[in-house]
Amino acid sequence: MSDCLFCKIRDGEMKASIVREDEDTIAFEDINAQAPTHVLVIPKKHIASIDEIEPVDAEVVGKLFLAAKEIARQRGHDEKGYRVVMNMGPDAGQAVYHIHLHLLGGRSLSWPPG
Ligand code: AMP
Ligand code: ZN
């Protein structure tokens, strides 16, 4: 997707503070951090939203969680906890249509969300 912001980050056409990368995923700092740790984990494959995830994508979607877990552990959030969330569509406030897990940690997070 040539006009996708996160594809541009993947391709190095847009700057980002990349914290982790593997064969299938990239993680980078959210530019508008909502917690001491606010990292976005994306698949390298462009998938616009949860609604467009296909069975063939199951492995890479699982890898998003594995990457988030690893970053959370590295930052010491595994003891107190952290949140991973993926928004889908306007009611959830999805702004970028390339799926991304938000990893939020380092402070107490309220529930339910607003
Ligand atoms: P969502 O509302 O779930 O689609 O989340 C989109 C997230 O992307 C927001 O938390 C934004 O702050 C973040 N974001 C937007 N542009 C960038 C960027 N260029 N680099 C890093 N994070 C970004
Ligand atoms: Zn994309």
Image (cartoon, helix red, strand yellow):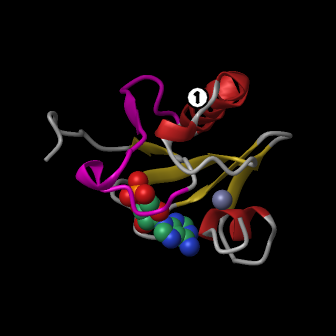
What secondary structure do most residues of the magenta stretch adopt?
loop
Give the extent of the magenta segment: 76-97
Q: In the rendered image, which quarter is residue 23 located in? A: top right
Residue type at mark 1 is Phe
Q: Is residue 92 above or below residue 13?
A: above
Q: Is residue 36 visible?
A: no
Relative to 16, is 90 on the left or the right? left
Asked whether residue 58 appears in the rendered view, the answer is: yes
Q: Is residue 27 magenta?
A: no
Residue 62 coordinates in the image, percent (x, y): 63, 24
Say which residue appears at 55% left-offset and 47% top-offset.
99
Viewed as shown, does residue 55 lie left or right of 87?
Answer: right
The answer to whether the beta carbon of the residue marked 1 is less than 8 Å from any atom of ligand 1 is no
- In front of the other: 82 or 2: 2
Residue 16 at what x, y percent from top left? 66, 70
Picture quarter with ligand 2: bottom right
Q: Nearer the viewer, residue 44 or 71?
A: 44
Between residue 102 and residue 54, name the one nearer to us.
Answer: 54
What residue is shown at x 54% (from left), y 51% (from top)?
40
